[in-house]
Amino acid sequence: MKKAKTTPSRIAGLTQLGQPTRQPQSPDEAVLEKAPNPHPGTLYLIRFTQPEFTSLCPMTGQPDFAHLVVDYVPNKYIVESKSLKLFFNSFRNHGAFHEDCTLMIAKRLQAAIQPRWLRIGGYWYPRGGMPIDVFYQTGKPPAGLWLPDTGVPSYRGRG
């Protein structure tokens, strides 16, 4: 199998890709890196799914778990996926409410890559017997965008 050539201009400035990278200890320490959109001017959706997201309850310090789905339409840049994984993992020792974690992720992505459109679904597992789902989007999806369902069912417990 022929190895794909890496375009140096596409990876210039990326500091985490292709090498061991220390796990950031907090979301503030995490660096979201970007690369040029390989298909500027084309309407397409990028989806990241993080089914095992964790953070800490800011009151009890107990772990909280979520299934995150991030959809965005790139503009000039795409987010580099390793940096996004490290960013997600940086919440493991971060104490914040579900709403804060979900919106912090959305706003950091918006600031880093300035997408044409972005949405995030934070499907949080029950805390105190009640699941909390947090949804955010930057506006209406662009006309003509294929926007598949997130595939995350509503919480039903053992029912």
Image (cartoon, helix red, strand yellow):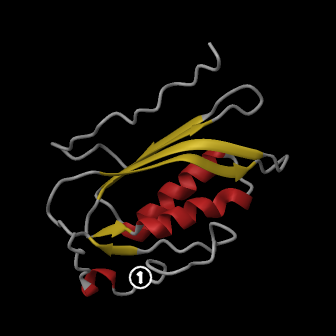
**Quarter of the picture holding the N terminus:** bottom left
SS label for mark 1? loop
Residue 141 picture quarter: top left
Q: Residue at x 20, y 73 (%)?
A: 2
Q: Kindly give the residue lying farthest to the front in the view shown.
A: 1
Quarter of the picture holding the C terminus: top right
Say whether residue 126 is left or right of residue 77. right
Q: Is residue 92 above or below residue 153?
A: below
Q: Is residue 149 left or right of residue 59?
A: left
Question: What is the three-letter code of the residue carrying label 1?
Answer: Leu
Residue 100, given in percent of the width and then of the height, sits at: 63, 51
Percent of width and height locating residue 103: 54, 52
At 48% from the left and 71% from the top, the residue drawn is: 32
Identify which residue is drawn at 33% across, 75% down.
35
- Residues 126 and 76: in front is 126
The residue drawn where x is 21% and y is 53% is 44
In the rendered image, the vertical position of residue 127 relative to residue 98, given as above or below = above
Residue nearer the viewer, 71 or 143: 71
Q: Return the residue at label 1.
A: 14
Above-or-below relation of 104 to 28: above
- Using residue 40 as the reference point, say whether residue 137 is left or right of it: right
Q: Residue furthest top?
A: 159
Q: Residues within 10 Å of mark 1 (few under 14, many from 20)?
A: some
* Whole-percent x, y for residue 133 in the image: 57, 35
Specify the quadrant of the image occupied by residue 90: bottom right
- Residue 89 in the image: state x and y as whole percent: 61, 61
Among the 4 quarters of the image, the one containing residue 109: bottom left
